[in-house]
Amino acid sequence: QVQLVESGGGLVQPGGSLRLSCAASGIFFRMYHMGWYRQEPGKQRELVATILSGGSTNYADSAKGRFTISRDNAKNTVYLQMNSLKPEDTAVYYCNAAHLFARDNYWGQGTQVTVSS
């Protein structure tokens, strides 16, 4: 059974930091590209950052310079370090796993991030 379990969300003041984690189980982690997406109420889910199985990273313009995605293959975990948070970063953040070659694609349940004073 595949599980992606996000953690680390919460309430933070503008300018603050949070570190999200996504622990994967039931997949051969090294064979998956991992990503973080976010969704605000009434809006489409959007890409925040991805990290390929080989370690290459990609960021949405809104995340560049503030967010850092990383992965620990030994722990089957992907992280999103978020600094200089803004109110517009408020959303539910989802972890995604996409297989390198197959169509397997999985989502976590999401973790709420709220940036407010």
Image (tube, rainbow, N blue to C red):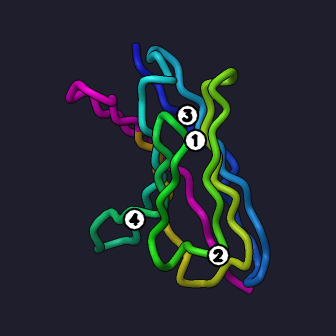
Query: How far apart in space, not on screen, are marks 2 and 1 (Cα)?
Result: 23 Å
User: Quadrant location of the C terminus?
Assistant: bottom right
Question: Sequence order check: which comes first, mark 2 or mark 3?
Answer: 3
- Label 2: few (<14), some (14–19) or many (≥20) C-alpha neighbours in 10 Å: few
**Left or right: 17 in relation to 62:** right
Question: Sequence order check: which comes first, mark 1 or mark 4?
Answer: 1
Dot 4: element: strand
Q: Which residue is mark 4?
A: 39
Question: Sequence order check: which comes first, mark 2 or mark 1?
Answer: 1
Q: Residue at x 60, y 39 (%)?
A: 78
**x, y (%) of residue 91?**
49, 68
Q: Amino acid at mark 3?
A: Val
Dot 1: element: strand
- Label 4: few (<14), some (14–19) or many (≥20) C-alpha neighbours in 10 Å: some
Q: Where is 50 relative to 16, above or below?
A: above
Are the two marked residues, 2 and 3, in contact with CB atoms closer than 8 angstroms? no
Magenta range is: 97-117
**Left or right: 30 in relation to 82:** left
Query: How far apart in space, not on screen, are marks 4 and 3 (Cα)?
Result: 17 Å
Q: Residue 6 shows which numbered tag? A: 1
Report the front residue among 54 and 83. 54
Query: How far apart in space, not on screen, are marks 1 and 3 (Cα)?
Result: 4 Å
Q: Which of pointers 2 and 1 indicates the residue nearer the eye?
A: 2
**x, y (%) of residue 69?**
61, 53
Q: Amino acid at mark 2?
A: Gly
Q: Amino acid at mark 1?
A: Glu
Q: Which residue is mark 3?
A: 5
